[in-house]
Amino acid sequence: MKAQELNFLIWQRQKLKCMRWMQIKQVILSPVFYLTDKDKINYLRYQAIRFLKPELRDQYYDQAILVSKSLAGIMKTMMIKRLESSFTAFKNILNNLTKAT
């Protein structure tokens, strides 16, 4: 009887750990999905050169579309890394982006 009770307690503890991990995972991954979802944030601020008139873009910038997409990708990666490193730093960068936009 004691072995069954012990196994049940171990199972309950593992279940609680798993539930906690799922909650933590949701809290962490939710902002990451928001930052990477194309319907949410497009990082258009970093793609301004892409929206120049085609004749100007072709005359002055050889690879404007590629460069603008690359810069947006770099900024997306930076935002995710900032979130992973420090939530306070992430909040600060969001505030700065909001003020600048």
Image: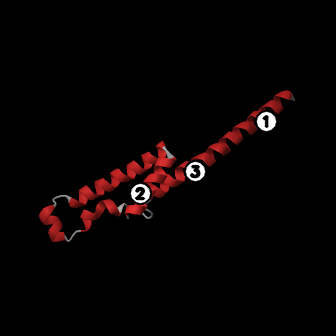
Locate residue 58, reporting x and y percent: 15, 65
Locate residue 88, reporting x and y percent: 50, 48
Residue at image location 70% in from the left, 37% down from the top: 14
* Badge 3 amino acid: Val
Q: In the structure shown, which secondary structural element does the residue marked by tag 3 occupy?
A: helix
Mark-to-mark CA distance, 2 and 1: 51 Å
Residue at image location 47% in from the left, 42% down from the top: 85
Quarter of the image that includes the C terminus? bottom left
Locate residue 24, reporting x and y percent: 60, 46
Picture quadrant of residue 53: bottom left
* Residue under label 3: 27
Image marks 2 and 3: residues in contact by CB distance under 8 Å: no
* Residue under label 2: 96
User: Closer to the observer: label 2 or label 3?
Assistant: 2
Mark-to-mark CA distance, 3 and 1: 29 Å
* Badge 2 amino acid: Asn
Disc with the residue nearer the chain's start (2 vs 3): 3
Residue 31 numbered tag? none
Does 3 sit above or below residue 58? above
Does 101 sit above or below residue 70? below
* Residue under label 1: 8
User: Closer to the observer: label 3 or label 1?
Assistant: 3
Residue 36 in view (yes/no): no
Locate residue 32, reporting x and y percent: 48, 52
Disc with the residue nearer the chain's start (2 vs 1): 1
Left or right: residue 89 compared with residue 101:
right
Disc with the residue nearer the chain's start (3 vs 1): 1
